[in-house]
Image (cartoon, rainbow, N blue to C red):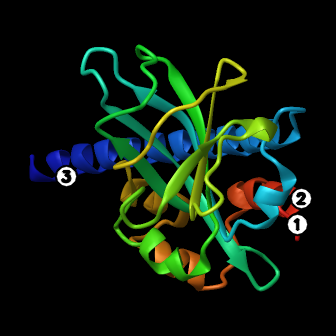
Amino acid sequence: MKTTHSFLLLTLVLGFTAKGADETVTRLNRATAIFAKMTESEHGIRPARIANADCIAVIPGFKKGAAVVGVGFGRGFISCRKDGGWSAPAAISLETASVGVQLGGEEIDVVVLSLNKSRRAKLLSDRFTIGSDASAAWGNGKSAHEDPNAQVLFYGQTKGAFAGFGLDGATLKRDQSGDAALYGKDVTNSQIVDSGAAPPAIAQPFVDGLAQRAKR
């Protein structure tokens, strides 16, 4: 009986692991497509801003809940410049208790640009608070409403249109389960980005997309 229970438990664990890996790959593919769309559009993110970015995070389908007004959550990936290229991506989550524009449950695709390399260690820590750990401003494509002194810029797109919103007080956190699904072990975001290791094959299109559109 004990052996049967152990087998069932192992089967359940493997099933959850496989499901998590599939969801991570799907999310990674969405992030790759979203970054391409938001940078190639005629009204997309300005090339100069991307060229100045030290780290780029892409969060596909950030959800602002309709039932619990103001609460938002999304999962995505972050990569930073490394040896003339871009690092392997680390998994992150974006959480906020308030979004400046009330979208009633709609999803927002979010791109976050960190312009200050000195903030990288904090950005890759377990908790980075936008507006507190670095000044931030939202952008609206080429007609951006941006603060020239901002260290973090964030862009949101919903239903194909850029939307203005606030993320002050929102937190970027390490997504432990996403990292485990990508790398098969418990590893921190700093270790992923700073190790210089090659990205896994499933993440290479994401890194290639950054390299293609974030040239200096």
Identify whether 24 is placed above or below 141. Answer: below
Of pointers 2 and 3, the one earlier in the residue sequence: 3
Identify whether 57 is placed above or below 69. Answer: below
Secondary structure beneath dot 1 equals loop
Residue on which the image places disc 3: 6
Secondary structure beneath dot 3 equals helix
Camera-near label (1 vs 2) is 1
Left or right of 155 in this view: 100: left
Please identify the quadrant where the C terminus is shown: bottom right
Residue 163: x %, y % from top left: 61, 27
Query: Marks 3 and 1, how far apart in space?
Result: 52 Å
Identify whether 99 is placed above or below 36. Answer: above
Q: What's under tag 3, amino acid-wise?
A: Ser
Count of numbered labels shown in the rendering:
3
Residue 86: x %, y % from top left: 74, 71
Residue on which the image places disc 1: 215
Left or right of 154 in this view: 102: left
Residue 59: x %, y % from top left: 56, 43
Secondary structure beneath dot 2 equals helix
Residue 89: x %, y % from top left: 61, 64
Q: What's under tag 2, amino acid-wise?
A: Gln
Give me the residue at 55% from left, 41% from top.
22
Query: Marks 1 and 2, how far apart in space?
Result: 7 Å
Q: What's under tag 1, amino acid-wise?
A: Lys
**One can see residue 161 in this view:** yes
Q: Nearer the viewer, residue 160 or 4?
A: 160
Give me the residue at 46% from left, 65% from top.
134
Give me the residue at 49% from left, 18% from top.
106
Q: Nearer the viewer, residue 199 or 212?
A: 212
Residue on which the image places disc 2: 212
